[in-house]
Amino acid sequence: MTPWIDTRAVTLYDPLTRPASVLGLELLAIAIAGLTLWHAVRSHRRGDRAALLTWVTILVYGVTIEIIVYNAVDNFAHAQFTVMFYDRLLPLYVTAIYPVLLYTGIATARRLGLPPLVEAFAAGALIVAMDAPFDVVGPVAGWWVWYDTDPNIAYRWLGVPVTSYYWHLTFGGTLAAVTAWTAARSARPGGPRLWLALPSAVATMVIGFLCFVPLHLLAAVGVSHGVTVATALVGCAAAAIVARKKGGATRGVDRALLLIWLAFYGYHAVVAAALANASIAGWPVRFAFVGVVAVAAAVVALPPRPWGPWARARAA
């Protein structure tokens, strides 16, 4: 259908012409991104020096990395959503999905009372956990398509390039570390100035790209991307679990963050169920995969019960 507005800067379609799952994803991502912004502002007002800087850095990083990828890489393409930017390449919801995934994972990790390096590892792992249902459901639902011409995305789990998970793990963990470091060294009573989001985003991308060097070096000597990424994910989650057992001071459940986790997973479960009813093959395995990821995220992020092994370890 002809768009209502069609320029190189912005394209606007009639939302009623978009598939139901597309429109639902747009509304969900924008609503949750708004909730993460509210959470960041509230945390900032309560004295958290890193929260708002982290949110703004994520937004700057997300838009910048998308534009870089559109001009440098040709291995995927987004579907046409209601609002598209940058010559119909960048959906509005994508600018929102970065805070949804990254801020939620980072804010959750920061409640665990972990050492700085382990906190970055935990943040990266939790971002991957947030991303898992999105990556597993998205291509099948038609939200984007992966091309088969790039060897860097050839190794896949359930159709998802493992390098997508490695990207979220390394870049997300790096962004968590960079913003925490910047906030900790700010001399201002109210925390760092928000213009520092730009150099923080640049530092995230530079360090993140460097984190891909070991992946490619190991691939050059015969270690598959799957083995490297699985090892990195398990290692980061294990580091967080071990650090918590040794005395991480969890601040309890944040209801806003928990609501985000449940709403995001819940929406993707509904879409997945609809696809399963449409007789699309492989959904039991996909459900099982996302379920395992969800359990792993809960083990890392949720506070231990008084009768749990962590509590007994602390008591000892």
Image (tube, grey):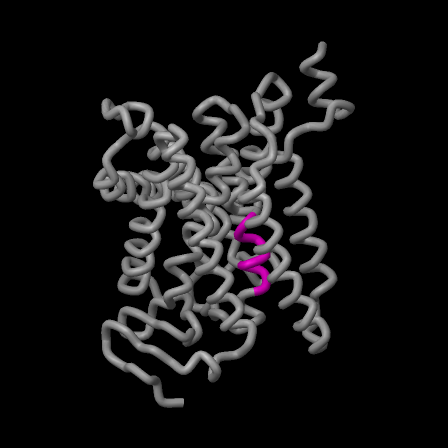
Residue at 41% x, 70% y: name it: 77
Q: Quadrant of residue 195?
A: top left
Is residue 105 found inside the magenta-colored segment of the image? Answer: no
Q: Quadrant of residue 151?
A: bottom left
Where does the C terminus fall, quadrant-wise? top right
Task: For residue 220, say whether it is visible.
Answer: no
- The image shows residue 109 at horizontal and vertical percentages of 51, 34
21 over 50 or under it: above or below: below
Horizontal side of 202 relative to 44 (left or right) equals: left
131 in the magenta segment = yes
Q: Which residues are magenta?
A: 130-137
- Identify the residue at image location x=45%, y=43%: 39
> In the rendered image, is residue 145 in sight?
yes
Chief SS of the magenta region:
helix
Report the side of 103 relative to 234 (left or right).
left
Percent across and percent down for residue 7 are: 24, 79
Q: Is residue 149 left or right of residue 128?
A: left
Front residue of 122 and 148: 122
Q: Residue at x 71, y 12 (%)?
A: 315
- The relative height of residue 148 versus residue 134 in the rendered view (above or below) is below
Residue 273 is drawn in which quadrant? bottom right
